[in-house]
Amino acid sequence: LGGTVTVRPHLIEFNGRKNLLFVFSKLHVLSLGLFRLRYKLIDLPSATPGDPDTIIQAECTGGVFRVFSTEDFPGLQPLTNLTQ
């Protein structure tokens, strides 16, 4: 895994509700295969670097995604209401 692995949230309104989106636009995977990402929400301003007792406020695991070779890439999926 490479690139920027920490991001700031973006507050958007979607379907009449306020949502926080964490966009990892500069994240890249260096190997082919199936993967999942684990996300941890930490209040960085209150965290102490190197402190093993830093409190993780929330944690979740994303869905499985596949990294294709250039030759096998099936193309981009259609845009959704959220990704437009």
Image (cartoon, helix red, strand yellow):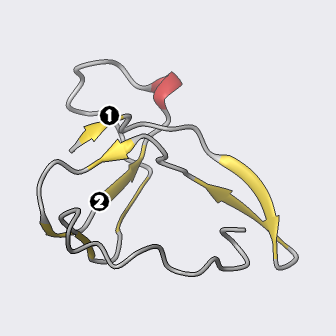
For mark 2, what is the residue? 38
Quarter occupied by residue 27: top left
For mark 1, what is the residue? 54
Q: What residue type is labelled 2?
A: Arg
Q: What residue type is labelled 1?
A: Thr
Packing grade of label 1 (10 A; few <14, some 14-19, many >=20) is some
Question: What x and y, as percent, mark residue 31?
Answer: 11, 55
Marks 1/2 in contact by CB < 8 Å: the verdict is no
* Above-or-below relation of 30 to 33: above
Quarter occupied by residue 78: bottom right
The residue sitting at the front extreme is 71
Question: What x and y, as percent, mark residue 65?
Answer: 29, 74
Residue at 23% x, 62% y is 70
- Which image quarter holds the N terminus? top left
Quarter occupied by residue 17: bottom right
- In this rendered view, identify the residue nearer to me: 54 or 5: 5
Q: Secondary structure beneath disc 2?
A: strand
Q: Tell me the tag on residue 16.
A: none
User: Cα distance, mark 1 to mark 2?
Assistant: 17 Å
Residue at 38% x, 34% y is 4
Question: What x and y, as percent, mark residue 7?
Answer: 50, 38
The residue sitting at the top extreme is 49
Residue at 35% x, 39% y is 5
Q: Secondary structure beneath disc 1?
A: loop
- In this rendered view, identify the residue nearer to me: 81 or 21: 81
Packing grade of label 2 (10 A; few <14, some 14-19, many >=20) is few
